[in-house]
Image (cartoon, helix red, strand yellow):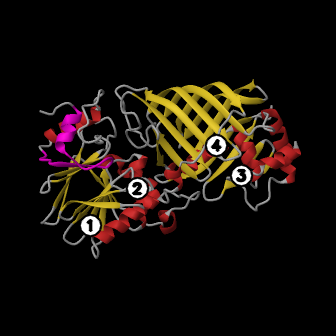
Amino acid sequence: MRRVLAMLATVVLLCSSRPAVAEDGQPTLERAALALGAGALRTLEYSASGVSFAVGQSVVPGSAWPRFNIPSFTRAMNYETASLRDDQVRLRAELPPRGGGVPTVGEARQVAVVSGDLAWNLVGEAAAPAPVALVERQLQLWTTPHGVIWAAMASHATVQGRTIAFAVLGRYTIRATLDGSNLIERVEAVLSSPVVGDMPVEIRYADYREFGAVKFPTRIRQTAGGFPVVDFTVTDVRPNAPVDIQVPDAIRQATRPYARVTSEPAAAGVWYLTGGSHHSVVIEMKDHVIVVEAPLNDERATAVIAEARRLVPGKPIRAVINSHHHFDHSGGLRAFAAEGIPVITHETNRAFFETSLMAPATMTPDRQQDARRNVVVEGVRDKHVLTDGARTVEIHHMAGNTHADGLLLVYLPAERLLIQADAFTPGLPNAPTPAIINPLSVNLADNITRLALSVDRLLPLHGRMVPLADLQRAIGRSN
């Protein structure tokens, strides 16, 4: 058993020059490895079903994440290569839907992968980099019952009684608790979210059964930030199943994808910043600049700030407008806060950002963790106008949507441009009306009519710049 555990310490991700687990903790890990059947285990695949919740996609800050039914879930893991692949079918559990997450309506298959220090998603045969998900996916691998043993043996773990604790510097901490049978019953972890700073994660394992030579839980429940994330019933476990996760060439070559920003003029003094999955807009005023949207994380936001300054040299950024609080659309706000740039958001989100933008992010320190700048957050309600006498920027609340109560539209009346997030993501040019019409797109069109906005073009914060006619066609209202 000692020789087997020594081999576990070669795990790719966590190997370092630090000493392995202290000798006085070795017997505890040996007993846990023996009880779990971890000695000869190199790969594992399990199937499950249940419910999951879209983290960071609540309808209002501070409420539970939206719930989805998961009729099919398969997780394949290779501990030797530090690889994991999740393949699931997901559909809304709440109708009408409240909050974000994919799909808005209908059913969707999602494939999420990590291998070593690379994370990506698969959409059909296409692989898209997902570095913002890297740490969370690595955490999922090393917090599985057998993953805890692998990781503990490869890190400077401490063992006190029935508690195993270790950390991966700059990423997360893990504390696992053994039950009376030396099986992992609870894992507590902390990792840094780009939005809320250090976020606690808890996973509880129960109802272990034997599957060949290993024991594995048949009930898995997870929370994040105090809200439920997963409640799965495991139906099948395949120890040492073939799990060969290869990194696509496109992912190996995608160096720092969030740092690549492409600028496209939308009007005089207005630029559409793309180059990734989430977009921003730069608006030049007489003596300053306004940026719409700081998505994803520090790296993306820093690249957006740099591009704004390149496009409009000599004028300071006086504000960043946040479309809504969902984590993928607000993950870069801490980088703006670190530079003392005020945040404009809906009043519903103001208190949330005043707290989260000042929260510590000690696991993966970001720019705001280093700067600790005081944050100015301005909340708007139905309408707010920014003008310098030459250009006018209108901010409108998108009433009646089910995506986020504080969802904002940004409208430039002189340029007849409308900036919006998540309500409408254009498909391919001349695409037919979809079989299932997105109710958020219908709501967007209704808000344009209600607000009497004269719109020629849409600047979606996903997708591409399109004429208003594309929205009308997508909801079946074209002439």
Q: Which residues are magenta?
A: 453-475
Q: What residue does disc 3 label?
A: 166
Mark 1 vs 3: CB contact within 8 A:
no
Which dot marks residue 141? 4
Q: At 14% from the left edge and 52% from the top edge, which residue is drawn?
A: 416
233 shown above or below 40? above
The one of 413 and 370 positioned closer to us in this rendering? 413
Q: Amino acid at mark 3?
A: Phe
Element marked by disc 1: strand
Name the front one of labels 3 and 2: 3
Q: Amino acid at mark 1?
A: Val
Element marked by disc 4: helix
Quarter of the figure with residue 306: bottom left
Q: What residue does disc 1 label?
A: 289
353 shown above or below 473? below
Name the front one of labels 3 and 4: 4
Q: Would residue 124 be found to the left or right of residue 4 on screen?
A: left
Name the front one of labels 4 and 1: 4
Q: Is residue 197 visible?
A: no
Q: State how many labels appear.
A: 4
